[in-house]
Image (spheres, helix red, strand yellow):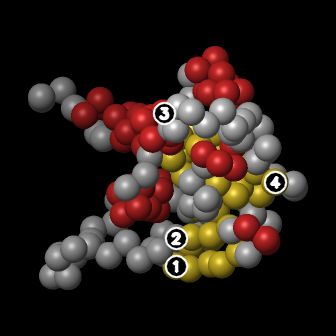
């Protein structure tokens, strides 16, 4: 049975195989506020995540990453290493920052590893929609990689996935007195 109050775990993957794990504390800013559990505490993240994920290896050219994102209309590309463990994430924001900060005289080919956020913010497959929303809010991100219990990528959840879920489950659809 899933514990809806279990804190999410952040798995941080670095270079040279370094890996660390820490509990993400999603406490309310006002300690006197009582957090009321909601249905989001019971819904598994796997119910709303995207299961078909376009990924990149660290040596993929950034031009190809951009082409993939535009062709597939996606906002992020996880960077993975065998056997499918996420080591970073490339988002549209990374491309904007790269373009603005780019040295136009430097013609060195760039690869995914040069552009990615060099850590993978993940939740495991047992996390809930509430965990994902809390992590995105506290870390100020819009995409979270979802991994299985062995740390392999099995999906991605975006803030838009959470918003869509909320829109379908907010209770207004069944009310006629609005």
Q: Which residue lies furthest to the front in this view?
A: 105
Nearest to the observer: residue 166 or residue 9: 9
Label 3: few (<14), some or many (≥20) within 10 Å?
few
**Cα distance between the residues tagged 1 and 4:** 24 Å
**Cα distance between the residues tagged 1 and 2:** 6 Å
Q: Can residue 18 be seen in this view?
A: yes
Numbered disc in front, either 1 or 3: 3
Numbered disc in front, either 2 or 4: 4
* Residue underneath mark 1: 23
Label 1: few (<14), some or many (≥20) within 10 Å?
few
Q: Which of marks 2 and 4 is nearer the N terminus?
A: 2
Q: What element carries label 4?
A: strand
Q: Residue 13 in the image: x percent, y percent?
A: 68, 67
Task: Identify the residue shown where x is 79% and y is 71%.
Answer: 16
* Residue underneath mark 4: 81
170 sits left or right of 77 in the view: left
Figure check: 12 above or below 160: below
Quadrant of the image containing the N terminus = bottom right
* Residue underneath mark 3: 99
Numbered disc in front, either 1 or 4: 4
56 sits left or right of 27 in the view: right
Q: Earlier in the sequence, mark 1 or mark 2?
A: 2
**Cα distance between the residues tagged 2 and 3:** 34 Å
Q: Residue 177 in the image: x percent, y percent?
A: 12, 29
Q: Which of marks 4 and 3 is nearer the N terminus?
A: 4
* Residue underneath mark 2: 8
Q: Is mark 1 on a helix, strand or loop?
A: strand
Q: Which of marks 2 and 3 is nearer the N terminus?
A: 2
Q: Please identify the quarter of the rendering in which residue 140 is found.
A: bottom left
């Amino acid at each position: 049975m899933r514990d809806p109050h279990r804190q999410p775990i952040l798995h941080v993957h670095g270079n040279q195989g370094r890996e660390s794990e820490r509990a993400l504390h999603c406490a309310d800013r006002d300690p006197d506020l009582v957090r009321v559990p909601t249905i989001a505490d019971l819904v598994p993240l796997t119910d709303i995540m995207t299961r078909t994920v376009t990924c990149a290896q660290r040596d993929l050219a950034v031009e190809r990453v951009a082409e993939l994102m535009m062709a597939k209309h996606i906002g992020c590309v996880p960077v993975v290493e065998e056997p499918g463990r996420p080591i970073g994430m490339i988002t549209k924001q990374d491309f904007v920052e790269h373009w603005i900060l780019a040295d136009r005289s430097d013609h060195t080919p760039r690869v995914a590893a040069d552009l990615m956020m060099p850590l993978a913010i993940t939740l495991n497959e047992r996390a809930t929609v509430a965990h994902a929303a809390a992590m995105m809010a506290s870390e100020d991100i819009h995409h979270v990689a979802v991994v299985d219990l062995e740390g392999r990528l099995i999906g991605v959840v975006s803030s838009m996935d959470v918003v869509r879920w909320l829109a379908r489950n907010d209770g207004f659809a069944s009310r006629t007195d609005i």
